[in-house]
Amino acid sequence: MTAIDSAPAPGTAPTAVVGALTVRAGRWIDGWDAEDHMQWESEGRRIATRNLRWSIFAEFLGFVVWQLWSIVVISLPAAGFTFDVSQTFWLISMPSLVGATLRFPYTFMVARFGGRNWTIVSAALLLLPVIGLALCVGDPETPFPVMLGVAALAGVGGGNFASSMANITYFYPQREKGWALGVNAAGGNLGAAVAQFVVPIVITIGAAGTLSLPAAGWIWVPLIVIAIVGAALRMDNLSSAKADLAASVAAFKEPHLWILAFLYLGTFGSFIGFAGVFPKLLADQFPDFSALHIASATIPLAFLGALCGSLARPYGGRLADRFGGATITVAAFSAMALLTTAVILTLPFIGFWGFLGLFLLLFTASGMGNGATYRMIPTVFAWRAGAEDAHRTAGDIGSQRKASAALGIISALGAYGGFLIPQVLGLSKATTGGYTSGLSWFLGAYVVMIAVTALVYLRASLRSGTRL
């Protein structure tokens, strides 16, 4: 174990470490510079990797909590709850609304309290929604406002993404940000798939024809405790991780922040929105095929969507590292537009497996787009700051801090897709009896996003000679 792995006792002098790094009490590291090649290769990469692992685990649990209601609502009627279509879609979308909003303050918590310290706190907050869910779904007489309030608490899981990504961006050099951020995000995104896979099994296995809905909350408590302890013992705070108010204000004033947020609403917003509503879509369109029944356990198929999108995300980031985020983002939106068109045209007569296949491809395309668009953010801010090679260098410290603030702000704005997509589809279902109308709105949005990415960033790449 090196000096970085164990903090000195309070009151002792800082411990010198290879590459001009020092560690203080509370696992604070001074002198961190990921762009320093010697420091990175001698000590930095190992430290960054260790922090990335625990960041992924904590964020993974955040996504689990964030998506619990997307699968629990499918089982509420069988448990004796009687909610209408509108109420059901509100339970699905409320965690995303709260989670997206919490991403704004969560963006700045790493700079204020330290990445390790805030991971401990944000992981501990996950105990509130899982315990609350376990208590309220056990009683069919629980009023809808109470259920909606507990669903809103699950939004704390969505907030974790912003602080986690803002933290990890400080640990990695610009040339490796795409892969690191993609892996961190993908590990978190997998929580949506795992929740949708595990919960239906847990609440039905051994239940002798009944449901044990409270187990959907209780099973995550031990894992959350492990995340809290692991973050405390194995993660670090970087004293250089500063996202001051001036940087945040500057990020808000940057026109490209709003353009990138619009594009991220299309990629990540589509992923998280469709992930939340996909179990409901399958149950409505194909009630006899949406799950497999083995003995007393129910094994759902909706989790495959979130799984495909999650696994695709880091590869979108890696392709963006190689070819530029704008190029891969245009390709992703083009695929999403084509696939949405195919769903609209075939929805009246397509069979279950065809419907499932098209949506899995749509999830994959959105996941690739997630990684690519997110990779563009630090590149665009470095380009705007005048970096000679914005694709490979991070620019000055001011542009890095502004980019870090932008990462959280854009992730927050993009996450509103998790609220908008279920609401649009719910409105479509309630007014027309189907989902074609809602899907048509998404198709139009994807076409606009293709045009914006091409006109703003592909054209700028050609003019400047920098891959954006």
Image: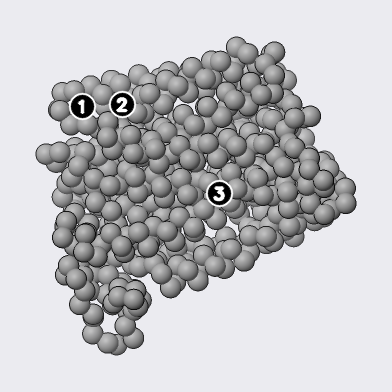
Question: In the shown orientation, is residue 209 left or right of residue 106?
Answer: right
> Which mark is drawn over residue 327?
2
Q: Does residue 151 sit above or below 272 in this rendering?
A: below
- Marks 3 & 2, CB-CB < 8 Å contact: no
- Front in this rendered view, residue 364 or 11: 364
Residue type, mark 1 in image: Ser
**x and y percent of residue 307 in the render?**
55, 40
Q: CA distance from mark 3 to mark 2?
A: 28 Å
Residue at horizontal 59%, vertical 15%?
A: 344
Q: Mark 2, residues whose alpha carbon is within 10 Å: few (<14), some, or many (≥20)? A: many
The dot on residue 191 is 3
Please indicate whether residue 430 sits to the left or right of residue 340 in the image.
Answer: right
Q: Which of the pair 405/180 is nearer the observer?
A: 180
Q: Marks 1/3: CA distance?
A: 35 Å
- Evaluate if marks 1 and 3 touch, with contact meaning CB atoms under 8 Å apart: no
Contact between marks 2 and 1 (CB within 8 A): the answer is yes
Coordinates of residue 253 in the picture (x, y in percent): 27, 40
